[in-house]
Image (tube, coloured by chain):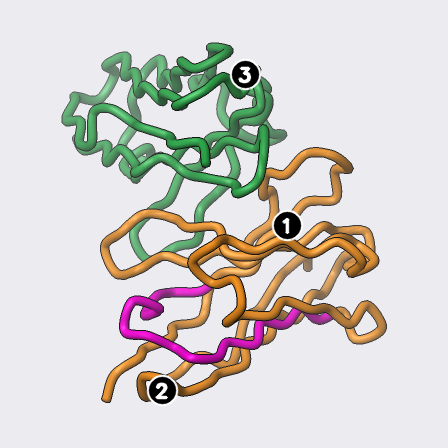
Amino acid sequence: QVQLVESGGGLVKPGGSLSLSCAASGFNFSAYYMSWIRQAPGQGLEWLAYISRSGKTILYADSVKGRFTISRDNTKNTLFLEMNSLKADDRALYYCAGTAVTGDWYFDLWGRGTLVTVSS
Amino acid sequence: DIQMTQSPSTLSASVGDRVTITCRASQSIVGWLAWYQQKPGKAPKFLIYEASTLQSGVPSRFSGSGSGTEFTLTISSLQPDDVATYYCQQYNSYPLTFGGGTKVEI
C-alpha cells in the first residue's frame, strides 16, 4: 500500500523545537521529490520546504527559512523536518507530500498530517 | 512571489448543477497549475495538473482550463461526494503558492 505517514507533532512552547518525520512505504521513496506543506486551523495550504530526490537541492519559504530544516534518508525511506524557534503562528497540521515527476512541482501523494501546537 | 486568488470563496449549488471555480495568478504561470480537492479532516487529493490534465482515477465530470493568469475548475454535474474545499496551486516558480480555497456546498 502506497502511503506517507507523518509523526512527531505535539505541543511545544514558543521558542522551542520539534522534529517531524514522514515514513514512506509501498513505493520507491528515493524517486520522489518531497515537500512539507502546512495548514493552519481553518485556513488554506502553505508550502514550506522542498528537497530533491538526492537531497542536493533544498528550497524554503521565507516564513520558515533559517528556522526549519528539511532532510531525507533514502536508506530509511524517511523525510524529516527540524523546526526551531517555533512561534504561535507555526501552529498547524503539517503534511509531507511529493511527486515522482521530474520538473513538475505538484503533489500527487500526500500523508495524513501531524498536528503541531505552539503554546505556553 | 506569485499570488493565487480564488473566487468565489464559498459556493452553494444543487446536485446536478454545473459549477465553476476561478483561480487567478498575479503573473503568468503559463499552464503550470494544479487543482486539489480537500474533504473535511482529510488530506488534499490531487485532481488536475498542467491546468487541464485529469489525474488518473478522477471522475470525468471534473475539468480544468486556462492559461497565463486565469484558470477555471469546472464540475459538470455536481454530486454529493463533491462537497469539499478546492485549491489551486501554481508550480511555475518557487515559492510554490496555493489559492485561498473555494468551499463547495450543496
Which circle marks residue B52 in the picture? Answer: 3
Q: Position of residue A76 (x, y in %)?
A: 79, 75
Where residue B103 sits in the image (x, y, percent)?
A: 23, 36
The x and y percentages for residue A1 are 68, 59
What colour is chain A?
A: orange
Looking at the rendered structure, the kind of residue marked 1 is Gly
**A85 within the magenta span:** yes
Q: Which residue type does callout 3 highlight?
A: Ser
Q: Does dot 2 land on a helix, a strand or a loop? A: strand
> Which residue corresponds to mark 1?
A98
Residue B56, compared with residue A92, is above or below; it is above
Q: Residue at x 36, y 57 (%)?
A: A39
Q: Where residue A68 sits: x, y (%)?
A: 53, 70
Write down the residue under mark 2. A12
Q: Dividing the picture into quarters, in which one does residue A90 lie?
A: bottom left
Q: Quadrant of residue B17?
A: top left
Badge 2 amino acid: Val
Please rate how many residues cluster around mark 1, counting C-alpha atoms within 10 Å: few if below 14, some from 14 to 19, many from 20: many
Q: Residue at x 48, y 55 (%)?
A: A37
Mark 2 and mark 3 in contact (Cβ < 8 Å)? no
The magenta stretch is: A78-94
Name which residue lies at 77% across and 59% down.
A29
Residue for point 76% across, 69% down: A77
Any part of residue A28 in sight: no
Is residue B8 or residue B97 the one in the foreground? Answer: B97
In the drawing, does residue A116 fall left or right of residue A3? Answer: left
- Give the quadrant of the C terminus of chain A: bottom left
User: In this rendering, which labeled residue sits more in front, label 3 or label 2?
Assistant: 2
Q: Are marks 1 and 3 on the same chain?
A: no
Q: Which chain is green?
A: B
Tell me the CA gap for discs 1 and 3. Answer: 20 Å
